[in-house]
Image (cartoon, rainbow, N blue to C red):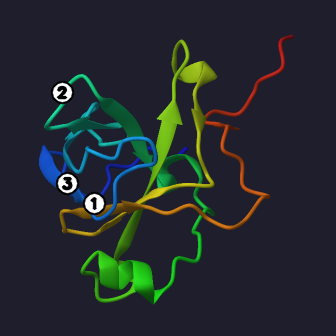
Amino acid sequence: MTTSVLSEPTTASTVRLVEPLPGFDDELDFTLIPIDPDGVLLAMRSMRNPGLRFVLTPAECFFEGYRPALGDAVATALGAASEADLRVLLVLTIAGDLTDATVNLRAPVIMARGGSAALQVVLDDETLSMHQPLLPTVAPH
């Protein structure tokens, strides 16, 4: 896990989805708020329905080598100059605590760095897990 402070702002920002998340057709406007001071965990909360919240993490915090090929169409849809200007966020599923958390590597949320538009991209790569453990499993002694 990368422990350095991220270069992205760690204050609340507004996010507008270019397309709704699957199953949440009426939800396009969210706030993105850091859960911790370093921005390792982020809460993406619906502005229309504040009870709806997703926990995200920047991919580089836990999966340093994870960088899906997104293409120029994604960059254009988000108002970014190129794919290099995109920020990759992973959606967490937390059943109990972070030791049991998993991330969806198959459908990251993509944002333009410094922008407010976002898009969840479903990658056509069946080798990517939708339930990848966030933390490495440590065998008991």
How far apart are the two marked residues, 1 and 2, measured between alpha carbons?
27 Å
Q: Which mark is residue 50?
A: 2
User: CB of mark 3 within 8 Å of CB of mark 2?
Assistant: no
Up the image or down, 21 lies above or below 52; here it is below
Which of pointers 1 and 2 indicates the residue nearer the eye? 2
Query: What element does badge 2 sit on?
Result: loop
Residue type at tag 2: Pro
How far apart are the two marked residues, 3 and 2, measured between alpha carbons?
14 Å
Q: Which mark is first along the chain, 2 or 1?
A: 1
Q: Which mark is residue 7?
A: 1
Q: Is residue 133 left or right of residue 90?
A: right
- Which residue is at a point 54% across and 12% down the rendered structure image? 96
Q: Which mark is first along the chain, 1 or 3?
A: 1
- Which residue is at a point 83% across and 12% down the rendered structure image? 140
Task: Point out residue 16 in the picture as x, y percentages from the top left corner.
Answer: 20, 57
Q: What is the quadrant of the C terminus in the image?
A: top right
